[in-house]
Image (spheres, rainbow, N blue to C red):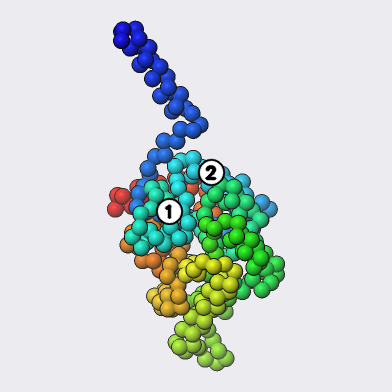
Amino acid sequence: MTRLKKYNVQWVLAILVLLLAHSPFYTPDPVWYTDRVAVIAYHHIDDQIQGDVTITTQRFHDQLTDLLQRGYHFISLQQFREYLAGGAVTPNAVLVTFDDGYRSFYTNAFPILEQLQIPAVNFVITKDLENPLQSRIPSLSREEIRTMAHAMDTLDFQCHTDSLHDLGPDGGALFTSRLKKGDRVETEQEFNNRIIDDTKKCRAKLSELYPKPVDAFAYPFGIYDKQSDALIHSAGIRYAFTTAIGFAERGVDPMQIPRFNAGSPFIKANSLNNLIIHKLHQTQNQ
């Protein structure tokens, strides 16, 4: 090969590399982290209502799209279970969760999840299944849950209590506080039975709607203690999610899984990535 032809070949190769790097089909997929999962939490997706845990449909779409473009990979609850059991997980793994079972999950979030093919978990307050449009914020109906579960095999619907997502008269969480019964306070056994019965009722109602295991739980208001933790575990819960900020790493207590709050109106599209990376750096420097 002549020197001129050699230079021409090198020049063509250089141009091809340059074009590939700027091609929309080229995805460098940087590795931000491995062998851990960023569990992100949402509540309400609404374009009219404003609140501390409410974001717009566009913000939700932009957050997920931004993570996809940055090389994050979304996993299902089943893949998350397998990871905690010792299995491998993709780098930059993210699990999307929702609390409260609002109807906005069906009307606003589900179309985006389906379009982007992103798995998710919704923790449902199952007492609201009886009259879904009568709750303070309209909630999911049985038929809506069935429709979504049939349309996307990677959607899960899990427990957020049946009727204990509230505060008692003294301001304590129903989930962790003993209640007054007339002129006395319920006994420890009565408290235990109340938590166990409520959890079993929640699991039973969801198990009627789709065939997957119902064994995950999100603590109401993020409030829990050792006793309530043990009680829901005895009622069949194997994975419980908190509001503590952090990564779910191998060896984490499966009944105290941390999450990142993604559903705040203050978290812009690129802010979610910044939040995750900031916590990653904190973790690595400890």
Report helix, strand or loop for mark 2: helix
Residue that appears at 57% across and 67% down? 210
Amino acid type, label 1: Ala
Residue that carries the numbered disc 2 in the rendered image: 65
Amino acid type, label 2: Thr
Query: Quadrant of residue 43 in the image?
Result: bottom right
Total number of numbered labels?
2
Residue that appears at 57% across and 71% down? 206
- In percent of width and height, residue 286 lies at 29, 53
Residue that appears at 55% across and 89% down? 181
> Taking the image as drawn, is residue 257 in sight?
yes
Crowding at dot 1, Cα within 10 Å, few <14 / some 14-19 / many 20+, comes out as: many
In the image, is residue 182 above or below residue 144?
Answer: below
Report helix, strand or loop for mark 1: strand
Residue that appears at 45% across and 60% down? 78
Residue that carries the numbered disc 1 in the rendered image: 38
